[in-house]
Amino acid sequence: MLPDTTARLKARFSTSMLGTVRTFQTDYLLDAQTIAPGATASVNERLFAGAKEVSIVGINFPFVGIGGYNKELGLNHFDLLIDWGWFYFITKPMFLAMDFFFRLFGNFGLAILMVTVLVKIIFFPLANKSYASMAKMKAVQPQMMALRERFANDKAKQQQELMELYKREKINPLAGCLPIAIQIPVFFSLYKVLFVTIEMRHAPFFGWIHDLSAQDPTNLFNLFGLIPVDPTVLPLIGQFLHMGIWPLIMGITMWFQMKLNPAPPDPTQAMIFNWMPLIFTFMLASFPAGLVIYWAWNNLLSVVQQSVIMRKHGAKIELFDNIKAMFVKKTPQQ
């Protein structure tokens, strides 16, 4: 309901129960008007009833945007009809970028891939610094192992010496977490775009993905449809028994990325890093396919980017050596 933008009014929204049915009502009351005998008065108001398409509603953002009714009719923040969330300053440009690439390629899945590349370019300086720090950490691995052996019975002294080593070599021990932390606001904004914009509903990608806003329809636990059962309906554990192809791809690419990183000196931290790909795989299995495709593509780009940067800083890329070490039985040292 759209009163005149200059009108003074009292707006109200209410809900109540009518028998077993919940009803909702919204209305507004304009200021009273005094009409002289023989005179006339008029009130202008509009009603919008339809799908909240951004091209129709409009969207405002500095230097760029989509006009729609908000601009054409001079309305008062009509673009807020679409709930962009608290982080609208990320969500809005995310949608605008995706809309641009969609008009260019005609596929929202390809638009997600292109936006991912754009995000990687924007955050390249931070990623470069992070991967450079990781390269230095890999270079001092022998010194770290020597400190662990030297102070094996004194954990406090061991941590103190490691911190001194990090400080001396200008190493950030949490550098491996930074590339993932950078993704969080982008991941949230993409989730919001998939969730609130009608343009993304039933938007196909390729192959079996016919709706980027819905989860991957395939399932590992029924051998991707070969077994004619739906394990997700099982009581208690059914909700955990959905694992599509794209979540598996995402988990594998994340695992490869983790194996590029130097092993953390702390056993607890190392265990967390080893389990993180599996945890994220199950976490994202029920998320919209568009998000999972974004994360998998981002992981693949990160593996390439990290390999190039670490090699540039003289660090040996031991991806396959680290994977091989997982399957080699360690012999106890004498």
Image (cartoon, helix red, strand yellow):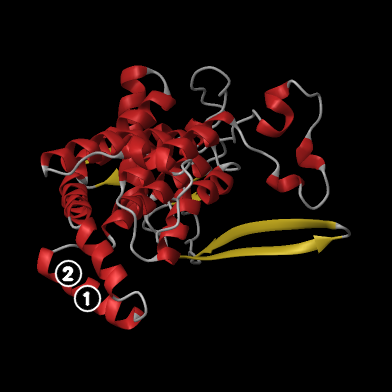
Query: Residue at horizontal 30%, vertical 76%?
Result: 151
Q: Is residue 173 visible?
A: no
Query: Residue at horizontal 37%, vertical 79%?
Result: 153
**Residue furthest right in the image:** 19
Position of residue 160 relative to residue 122, above or below, is: below
Horizontal and vertical percent position of residue 187: 41, 47
Tag of residue 165: 2
Q: Is residue 146 visible?
A: yes
Position of residue 70 relative to residue 206, above or below, is: below
The quarter of the rendered structure image containing the C terminus is bottom left
Horizontal and vertical percent position of residue 245: 57, 29
Horizontal and vertical percent position of residue 163: 22, 73
Q: Amino acid at mark 2?
A: Leu
Query: Residue at horizontal 35%, vertical 49%?
Result: 183
143 with respect to 67 (left or right):
left
The residue closer to the viewer here, 133 or 213, is 133
Q: Amino acid at mark 1?
A: Glu
**Tag 2's secondary structure?**
helix
301 with respect to 217 (left or right):
left
326 with respect to 125 (left or right):
right
Q: CA distance from mark 1 to mark 2?
A: 6 Å
Tell whether label 2 touches label 1 (CB within 8 Å). Answer: yes
**Residue furthest front in the image:** 334
Residue tagged 1: 161
